[in-house]
Image: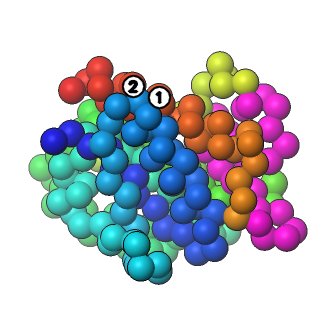
């Protein structure tokens, strides 16, 4: 059964909320979703396995920004995937990235670019957020051409803005639509 893997690490719930919005849009557009994390922090969390990654048809991958970089939990997982890389098991699968930070200039864009690196090394096809998504041009919080993002602000809110939600839905729709075309 074809599915899209939505893989994330979330410390305060922001990235989890992004993941769930992206997953919702993917399901609304006719694809099955498997939500996985790098380490279980909540009872409903399921920790990713290499088999989840190998057998997915596409991937949405997100972590909070840590000084402009991906969370260590995610980096540790990708460092164990050389066997998958050597066999070329992810080549030509579509992927997108998403992130959250505490401030507008907290490193979301550099984190997204860093999240993209292992995907590109694996031969995946990276999708961004095109400017036909109107919220990208009008957001006062998260959202970049590189992927969906959330900005928690001074109150460290994990509640997504309406613009952030719409950008997540656009990303999920785009990932599902392209994946179905490639199946």
Q: Which residue is drawn at 64% across and 63% down?
A: 14
Q: Where is residue 183 in the image (x, y as percent from the top left)?
A: 21, 26
Q: Does the magenta stretch include residue 152?
A: yes
Q: Can residue 2 be seen in this view?
A: yes
Q: In this image, 50 relative to 175: left or right?
A: left
> Which mark, by number, is residue 174?
1
Assign a secondary structure to mark 1: helix
Q: Is residue 127 visible?
A: no
Q: Is residue 147 magenta?
A: yes
Q: Position of residue 9 (x, y in %)?
A: 49, 67
Q: Name the residue under label 2.
A: 177
Q: Position of residue 165 (x, y in %)?
A: 65, 43
- The vertical placement of 96 against 38, above or below, is above
Mark 2 is surrounded, within 10 Å at the Cα level, by few (under 14), some (14 to 19) or many (20 or more) other residues, namely some
Q: Where is residue 36 in the image (x, y as percent from the top left)?
A: 36, 63
55 vs 125, nearest the viewer: 55
Q: Which residue is drawn at 54% across and 62% down?
A: 16
64 vs 67, nearest the viewer: 64
Assign a secondary structure to mark 2: helix
Q: Which residue is drawn at 27% across and 33% down?
A: 92
> Which mark, by number, is residue 6?
none
Q: In this image, 38 relative to 141: left or right?
A: left
The answer for how far apart the CA atoms under marks 1 and 2 are is: 5 Å
Quadrant where the N terminus is found in the figure: top left
- The vertical placement of 34 against 36, above or below, is above
Q: In this image, 108 relative to 117: left or right?
A: right
8 vs 105, nearest the viewer: 8
Mark 1 is surrounded, within 10 Å at the Cα level, by few (under 14), some (14 to 19) or many (20 or more) other residues, namely many
Q: Are marks 1 and 2 in contact (CB under 8 Å)?
A: yes
Q: Image quarter for residue 64?
A: bottom right
Q: Which residues, given as a range, are shown in magenta?
A: 135-157
């Amino acid at each position: 059964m074809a599915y899209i893997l939505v893989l994330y690490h979330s410390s305060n719930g922001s990235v989890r909320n992004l993941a769930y919005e992206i997953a919702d849009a993917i399901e609304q557009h006719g694809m099955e979703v498997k939500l996985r994390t790098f380490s279980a922090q909540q009872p409903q969390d399921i920790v990713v396995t290499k088999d989840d990654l190998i057998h997915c048809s596409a991937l949405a991958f997100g972590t909070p920004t840590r000084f402009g970089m991906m969370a260590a939990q995610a980096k540790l997982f990708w460092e164990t995937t050389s066997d998958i890389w050597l066999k070329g098991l992810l080549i030509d699968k579509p992927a997108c990235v998403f992130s959250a930070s505490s401030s507008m200039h907290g490193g979301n864009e550099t984190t997204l670019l860093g999240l993209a690196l292992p995907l590109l090394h694996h031969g995946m096809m990276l999708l961004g957020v095109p400017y036909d998504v109107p919220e990208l041009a009008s957001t006062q919080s998260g959202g970049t051409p590189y992927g969906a993002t959330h900005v928690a602000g001074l109150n460290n809110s994990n509640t997504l803005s309406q613009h952030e939600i719409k950008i997540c839905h656009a990303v999920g729709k785009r990932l599902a639509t392209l994946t179905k075309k490639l199946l």
